[in-house]
């Protein structure tokens, strides 16, 4: 496996959208409907949405890529270098200068192979290079696998927030990690 980590470009928008559509449902809690998941993907994870994310100067998208694989993009992260607008998150952060790890997803066949760790390391290095004192993320309180992965990378639960998927309000943990 010849995996490389790189910052995504606008040429990656369609492939990122396909990857997001394949991986986002894995993070959804039981009881999430296919219709709600599909609507979220169409609104927030389409090729058009990624095209916007990739030119936004406050965002960085990183990909793990294996050029020899049938689907070369294996995993991705998205970081947001902007103060949160969520009051529940702001209440638990130590600073408004915290960077959000907005997305961190990998294809299931990559789980446990070190791909996500390589990608997380690159993402945290980017945040450190920006001078952010901490990085935060939201993760569904029922997603034990993701929470365990984040804990292994120095994140800890600092509070809670809500996430709306369709008509359901999901409960997320806010996890925070010092960037250094």
Image: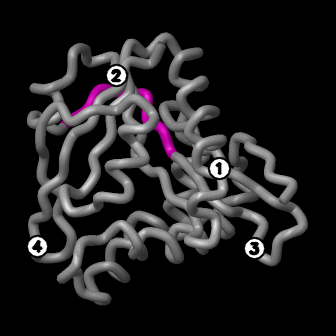
Horizontal side, residue 61 vs residue 85: left or right: right
- Disc sitting over residue 71 in the figure: 3
Over which residues does the magenta segment extend?
A: 78-85
**Disc on the earlier residue, 4 or 1:** 1
Horizontal side, residue 85 vs residue 71: left or right: left
Residue displayed at 39% across by 75% down: 25
Q: Distance from label 3 to label 2 (Cα)?
A: 33 Å
How would you rate the neighbour count of disc 1 (Cα within 10 Å): few for under 14, some for 14-19, many for 20 or more? few
- Disc sitting over residue 168 in the figure: 4
How would you rate the neighbour count of disc 2 (Cα within 10 Å): few for under 14, some for 14-19, many for 20 or more? many
Q: Distance from label 3 to label 4 (Cα)?
A: 32 Å
* Residues marked 4 and 2 touching at CB (< 8 Å): no
- Residue at disc 4, secondary structure: strand
Residue displayed at 29% across by 29% down: 176
The answer to whether residue 3 is above or below residue 119 is below
Discs 3/2, front? 3
- Residue at disc 1, secondary structure: loop
**Disc on the earlier residue, 3 or 1:** 3
Residue designated by label 2: 98
Percent x, y for residue 97?
34, 16
How would you rate the neighbour count of disc 4 (Cα within 10 Å): few for under 14, some for 14-19, many for 20 or more? few
Q: Distance from label 3 to label 1 (Cα)?
A: 17 Å
**Disc on the earlier residue, 3 or 4:** 3
Discs 2/1, front? 1
Q: Distance from label 2 to label 1 (Cα)?
A: 26 Å
Task: Choose top left, top right, bottom left or bottom right for residue 171.
Answer: bottom left
Residue displayed at 24% across by 86% down: 33
- Disc sitting over residue 169 in the figure: none
Residue displayed at 37% across by 18% down: 178
**Disc on the earlier residue, 4 or 2:** 2
Residue designated by label 1: 114
- Residue at disc 3, secondary structure: loop
């Amino acid at each position: 496996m010849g995996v490389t980590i790189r910052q995504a470009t606008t040429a990656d928008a369609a492939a990122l959208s396909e990857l997001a559509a394949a991986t986002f449902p894995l993070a959804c809690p039981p009881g999430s409907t296919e219709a709600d998941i599909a609507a979220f993907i169409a609104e927030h994870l389409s090729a058009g949405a990624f095209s916007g994310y990739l030119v936004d100067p406050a965002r960085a998208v990183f990909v793990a890529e294996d050029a020899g694989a049938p689907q070369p993009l294996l995993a991705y992260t998205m970081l947001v270098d902007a103060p949160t607008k969520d009051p529940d998150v702001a209440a638990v952060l130590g600073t408004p200068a915290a960077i959000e790890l907005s997305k961190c997803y990998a294809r299931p066949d990559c789980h446990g192979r070190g791909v996500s760790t390589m990608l997380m390391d690159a993402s945290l290095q980017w945040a450190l290079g920006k001078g952010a004192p901490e990085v935060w993320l939201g993760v569904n309180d029922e997603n034990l696998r993701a929470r365990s992965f984040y804990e292994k990378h120095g994140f800890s639960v600092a509070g809670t927030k809500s996430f709306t998927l369709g008509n359901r309000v999901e409960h997320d943990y806010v996890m925070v990690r010092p960037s250094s």
